[in-house]
Image (cartoon, rainbow, N blue to C red):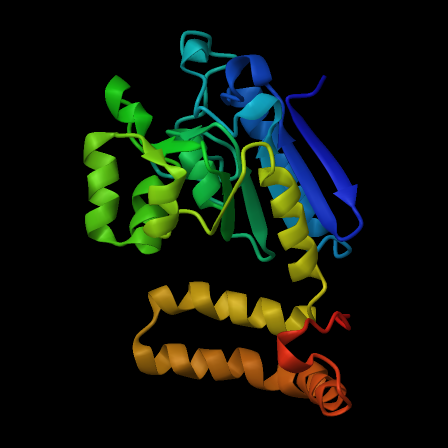
Amino acid sequence: MADVLFEPQGAIALITLNRPAQRNAVHRPMADALRAAFERFEADPQLRVAVLHGAGGHFCAGADLAAVADPRLRNELDPDGGPRAPMGPTRMQLTKPLVAAIEGYAVAGGLELALLADLRVAADDAQLGVFCRRWGVPLIDGGTVRLPRLVGTGRALDLVLTGRAVGAAEALAIGLVSRVVAPGEALAAALALAREIAAFPQRCMLADRASVYAQWDLALAEALRQEAHRGVPVVAAEGVAGAARFAGGAGRHGQPDSAGD
């Protein structure tokens, strides 16, 4: 069985980390396969949202430290931070939404994989954390960049410096995860969330998503200008028709309008 599974489900790409005996720890062949899966998702215009999860009750325990002694299996290390990250896709800048479904452990490099996602759905007994602190392995798959942007510098340093375990309730409270569900239900909830996102008018949603990420690199005035640059053309392309549907009675009282294209 392959270390990474890729299953299109309509507009959804389900990507599965598939080394359950190793709690889905990632070695180099798996990292390459995982990056290839995300490249496939990015390249397919029929796929609107990806869901990443782990087989066997755990999301991912990080890099496979047992593979370090084998040059064929150890994760690639590039001191210049090239595009081939040790965990595979973690230096990619995805142009479409990703939802992570977290059961069990999402720790060390596994946490960094989860941070690649736009949204994280966690089982209420899940455990997250920078467990690689214990072994002298640094965060080189985006953890020191994405974590403080997500939860703030102070909270990020609390996790990075201590390497402590973070339960789902705390992760939800600090914004590290987006939803908490009962054990065993993370994947179903993530797929439902992905289908909801995929049903929206896509140009509008993608323009807003791109603006949220791009604003980190810009001064306020330029960020506002770029927001308008992305969004105004979409008003004519999707917004006029959407407003007409609303005027005709669709989507009232907070009800969804699934007439996305």
With respect to residue 37, does 62 lie above or below?
Answer: above
User: Residue 143, position in %: x, y?
Assistant: 35, 40
Q: Residue at x 54, y 33 (%)?
A: 183
Q: Residue at x 25, y 45 (%)?
A: 156
Q: Residue at x 67, y 84 (%)?
A: 239
User: Residue 51, position in %: x, y?
Assistant: 62, 44
Residue with the most extreme right position: 10
User: Residue 113, position in %: x, y?
Assistant: 47, 37
Using the rendered view, name the quadrant where residue 233 is placed: bottom right
Using the rendered view, name the quadrant where residue 68 is placed: top left
Q: Quadrant of the C terminus?
A: bottom right
Taking the image as drawn, is residue 42 in sight?
A: no
Observer-nearest residue: 145 or 22? 22
> How many numbered marks does the figure carry?
0
Observer-nearest residue: 81 or 140? 140
Query: Going by the image, does 82 lie left or right of 173?
Result: right
Q: Residue at x 44, y 63 (%)?
A: 213
Observer-nearest residue: 15 or 249? 249
With respect to residue 108, does 47 lie above or below?
Answer: below
With respect to residue 215, does 111 lie above or below?
Answer: above
User: Residue 172, position in %: x, y?
Assistant: 39, 48
Taking the image as drawn, is residue 184 in sight?
A: yes
Query: Going by the image, does 58 lie left or right of 33?
Result: left
Q: Quadrant of the N terminus?
A: top right
